[in-house]
Image (spheres, grey):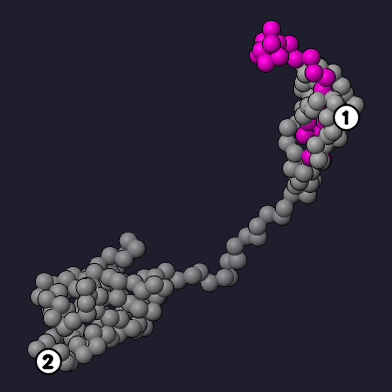
Amino acid sequence: MSWNDPDREDTTIYKVVVNHEEQYSIWPEYKENPLGWKDVGKVGQKPECLAYIKEVWTDMRPLSLRKKMEEMAKNPPPPPPPPDPNRPREKSLVDRLCEGDHPVEAGLRPEKTVKLFKDAIDRGYVHVKFTDTKGGTELGVRLDRDLCDFTKADFENGTGDVHVEGGLTLDYVKVRCVADINLGSLEGRGHLVKVEASGN
């Protein structure tokens, strides 16, 4: 039987060592302890040392974790304060866009041109982008031609203003988008109106 035979009995004498986190291991008795480990006073062959560790190491959690959990059990953190009933609730996006007029622009791709805007109007579906929200809010609006006004617009020369109105659903709320857009800049002012609130 050679020294490298896996079936050869291990006659090495080990010592049980422990670190500052009270985690146990074994180490050959003739070697210096690895950094951060110290003897616990138990020496013997591997099975004997492992049996000792199994007996004394009943909690595998590191000491620092155990102390932290014990401290939390003794002094649990205070519960979060109840919500302040007097604190005003943050307004929804719909509510914010329903209050007053906001800067808007025609949402057009791949470029902002009067021709593309006119094509969208002819299709009865335009994109209006509210630019004063975080990242901008672009809405697809199905035009209600009875409420739109294009009489002040000169699409040929890209001048004048258009008044567009149409319905959509934003955040599960049915709304009407109302906007006046200048053809020279393709920008203007607009707002939303809740359909339920308006009775339409």
Image height of 113 relative to 8, above or below: below
User: Is 35 contained in the magenta span?
Assistant: no
Residue type indicated by callout 1 = Val
Q: Residue furthest front?
A: 2
User: What is the x, y in percent for residue 154?
Assistant: 11, 90
User: What is the x, y in percent for residue 95?
Assistant: 39, 73
User: What is the x, y in percent for residue 126?
Assistant: 19, 73
Residue type indicated by callout 2 = Asn
User: What is the x, y in percent for residue 200?
Assistant: 23, 71
Which quadrant holds residue 38? top right
Q: Which residue is depicted at the point 87% across and 31% down?
A: 39
Q: Are marks 2 and 1 in contact (CB under 8 Å)?
A: no
Counting labels gives: 2
Q: Is residue 158 left or right of residue 81?
A: left
Q: Which residue is depicted at the point 57% across and 70% down?
A: 87
Q: Secondary structure at mark 1?
A: strand
For disc 1, the marked residue is: 40
Which mark is first along the chain, 1 or 2?
Answer: 1
Image height of 143 relative to 82, above or below: below
Q: Nearer the viewer, residue 168 or 193?
A: 168
* Magenta-drawn segment: 1-24
Which quadrant holds residue 179? bottom left
Which label was assigned to residue 129?
Answer: none
Classify mark 2: residues with Cα within 10 Å, few (<14), some (14-19) or many (20+). few
For disc 2, the marked residue is: 157
Q: Is residue 88 visible?
A: yes
Which quadrant holds residue 4? top right
User: Is 20 contained in the magenta span?
Assistant: yes
